[in-house]
């Protein structure tokens, strides 16, 4: 059974960079796409972007200028960096296996981690 | 405002059949497949339906999906208390060049 676990700071200051890592266990990160999704408090889900195990990434156009997603196949991990954060970036951040690379069919998810942007 | 429109809430009594709608446009539901998720707060979301009407192994056949034109529906029959959760639809959007989600429907089992 594939399992995903997000890790990283739960509090980030405004204007700084949010950094999260997703560790995949129970299966290889190879041959799949991997996505980041977030859910602001009281709001719906928003796709941030995804990455293929080879390193090719796609981003939500609304966040593209601030987002970088990378992969480390040797550690079975992929990571998210979101720069110049504001309070609007406060959300629960999820990582997920992206079954077809579209970002809409996500068959395994992490439990999510709350990231609060505040000074 | 979400690109895909879902009713914010739905309810039913145990044993009933409930339907949750997801309305979109020609650039998303009208030309791409729809996926449905169940989410209990504090837990990992779970895919219930993929490719409009396909159930992953382990998902009870009480859950079914359908699509017609620019709308899709998730039906839950034989409603159970453990079905109380938030439900989301999702699809690729050709105009936005990315996936879009519905705003979610909170299902209450009375």
Image: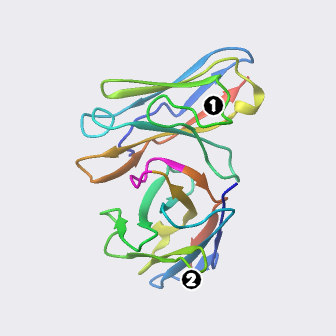
Are there few (<14), some (14-19), or many (20+) residues within 10 Å of tag 2?
few
Residue under the image location 55 percent in, 58 percent down: A96
Quick one: which residue is furthest to the top in this view?
B16
Report the residue marked by disc 2: A119
Q: Is mark 1 on a helix, strand or loop?
A: strand
Q: What stretch is highlighted in magenta?
A: A100-106
Are there few (<14), some (14-19), or many (20+) residues within 10 Å of tag 1?
many
Location of residue A117 (image quadrant): bottom right
Report the disc number at residue B107: 1
Q: Can residue A117 be seen in this view?
A: no
Residue B93's place in the image compared with A24, above or below, is: above
Residue A70's place in the image compared with B45, above or below, is: below
Which mark's residue is nearer the viewer, 1 or 2?
A: 1
Chain holding disc 2: A
Q: Is mark 2 on a helix, strand or loop?
A: loop
Task: Give the Cα separation between the discs numbered 1 and 2.
Answer: 36 Å
Assign the N terminus of chain A to one quadrant of the image: bottom right
Along the viewing direction, whichever of A109 and B54 lies nearer the viewer = B54
């Amino acid at each position: 059974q594939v399992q995903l676990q997000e890790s990283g700071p739960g509090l980030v200051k405004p204007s700084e960079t949010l950094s999260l890592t997703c560790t995949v266990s129970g299966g290889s990160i190879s041959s799949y796409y991997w996505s980041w999704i977030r859910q602001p408090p009281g709001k719906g889900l928003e796709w941030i972007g995804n990455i293929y195990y080879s390193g090719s990434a796609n981003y939500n156009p609304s966040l593209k200028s601030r987002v970088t997603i990378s992969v480390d196949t040797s550690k079975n991990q992929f990571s998210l960096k979101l720069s110049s954060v504001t309070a609007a970036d406060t959300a629960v951040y999820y990582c997920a296996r992206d079954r077809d690379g579209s970002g809409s069919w996500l068959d395994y998810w992490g439990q999510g981690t709350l990231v609060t942007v505040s000074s | 405002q979400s690109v895909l429109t879902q009713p914010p809430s739905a309810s039913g009594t145990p044993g009933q059949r409930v339907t949750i709608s997801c309305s979109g446009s020609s650039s998303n539901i009208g030309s791409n497949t729809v996926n449905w998720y169940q989410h209990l707060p504090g837990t990992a979301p779970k895919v219930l339906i993929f490719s409009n009407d396909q159930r992953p192994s382990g998902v009870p056949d009480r859950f079914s999906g359908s699509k017609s034109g620019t709308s899709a529906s998730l039906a839950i029959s034989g409603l159970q208390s453990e079905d109380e959760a938030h439900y989301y639809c999702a699809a690729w959007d050709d105009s936005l060049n990315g996936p879009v989600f519905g705003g979610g429907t909170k299902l209450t089992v009375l």
